Amino acid sequence: MVWADLKAHRAAQGDMRIETLFDDPRRAGEFSVRADGLLFDYSKTLIDAEARALLLTLAEEAGVAARRAMMFAGEKINETENRAVLHTALRHPGPGPVEVDGVDVLPGVHATLARMEDFAEGLRSGRVRPPGGGRFTDIVNIGIGGSDLGPAMATLALAPYHDGPRLHYVSNVDGAHIRDVLDGIEPATTLVIIASKTFTTIETMTNAATARDWLVRGVGAEAASRHFAALSSATDKTGDWGIDPSRVFGFEDWVGGRYSLWGPIGLGLMIAVGPKHFREMLAGGHAMDLHFQQAEGADNLAVMLALTGIWHAQVCGYPTRAVLPYEQRLARLPAYLQQLEMESNGKRVGMDGAPLEVPSGPVVWGEPGTNGQHAFYQLIHQGTQVVPCEFMVGAEGHEPDLAHQHRLLVANCLAQSEALMKGRGLDEAREMMAEAGYSGDELERQARHRVFPGNRPSTTLAYRRLTPFVLGQIIALYEHRVFVEGVILGINSFDQWGVELGKVLAQALEPIVAGEAGTEGKDGSTAQLVAYLRGEDG
Ligand code: F6P
């Protein structure tokens, strides 16, 4: 019913223009949310008072508040895997309790955090040394998906705080990835972290074996084992792999892979920026958790970010959204959010197994500004599809001597959202062309190419400076956004069955690609590609 009301309201808006909403001088303030220093401005969208009221009713009727309480209480809301969803516990400073099956998980979380800190400090100070002496100058994190994207994104984001050993991330099973990393470093001074929740992921285990061979060649078999650490829920498997238990940092099944940056999976980041900055990031995440639990209705930043997403994807029907950080160090944020949002909310059935009646979560993509402006913004401004844009920008950079560059960055960010909203009409384009000396049919033709339809929605998330605390706030904000959207869609945001089939087929194809088995039973296209790739089709 509320869905229908929302769609009817959108239809009734017709070709209403966003800028007309600013006839009300209170528009910007009233269609923004502030939380602990962040400002989320969604006033440059067609969400008006009635749309917002309906969206809030939608959230209420979907039971967002109740489901949120269940999540924070450690109930098993990941119903297809029968697991609690408690990544929030990893950033909870205590005291708790935060219980799963009646047991407070915080003492375990804090004990592991303390062990991580001791190890990280040891590496940073040189107390933890390679067996052959010297210092560990390079850390290689081998992991993929949630065991890579979060820490890799955050390590780049916090580059100004990076004062520990060099950190490299290897994820792709393509041997080029690990080769290019290992070629630039020395085995004698390298620590390899194997990051895998399950410790079975083929890419990670293959790269780990390659790293082990490289270490054995470089430092000998006995010393090689002292060059590893592991981050995993499968501590039995890390033991089988020969990793010393004192260098294994475990976590529980109630931490989903794409939500795992806050605990052991963040070890590399902690080594790079130090435990103090890592804790500041946790504090930012926790501050957002409190805000998400306490702020009511339209004052709740995560809820409004989610409702803006629902408005654009499910009500307006825009199939993608662009994440556009005007912050070079957030270059990996779009990739990180692709996993967080699309692996979480790219589902075709509801919790009850019935097909969704509305589209699932949208395609998420993006690049930092201003680079994107010189690549794909053309389509955003003049293409036939509407792409809701989510801008992000800080008031200050970390380069006070380059403040003039930061001003240009900010000006560009604001200019883009203004241009998207206002556009440029045909009359203005005609005037421009007349001034440029055109007339007649040629003026008309040229003018039409210079029209911007405008009325294209965008939101802006503004923050003071990209500190560890702010980064923590932003990541937790997006996690909660995904949660709220998932509850409204009625799906399970915490499983990922859609990645299974490809994995199974890849296993079966490996011997075929290797020439150890034939292509009988494979479709014609697959058989042809196998023949070509094996160099067998002439
Ligand atoms: O393939 C999907 C996935 O299961 C992700 O959800 C996960 O983050 C990634 O693989 C890596 O898994 P693991 O940490 O177990 O190696």
Image: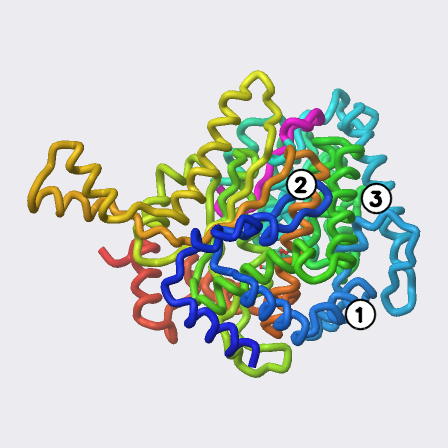
**Three-letter residue code for mark 3:** Leu
Q: Which residue is mark 3?
A: 113
Front one among 27 and 463: 27
Which residue is pictured at 15% across the width and 37% down the height? Answer: 434
Dot 1: what SS?
loop
Q: Is residue 369 above or below residue 163?
A: below
Q: Quadrant of residue 235?
A: bottom right
Q: Which residue is mark 1?
A: 75
Q: Are marks 3 and 1 in contact (CB under 8 Å)?
A: no
Placement of the C terminus among the 4 image quadrants:
bottom left
Residue 247 in the image, given as x and y percentages of width and height: 80, 42
Q: Is residue 354 magenta?
A: no
Q: What residue span does the magenta drawing correspond to?
A: 159-175
- Earlier along the polypeptide chain: callout 2 or callout 1? 1
Q: Which residue is mark 2?
A: 471
Dot 2: what SS?
helix
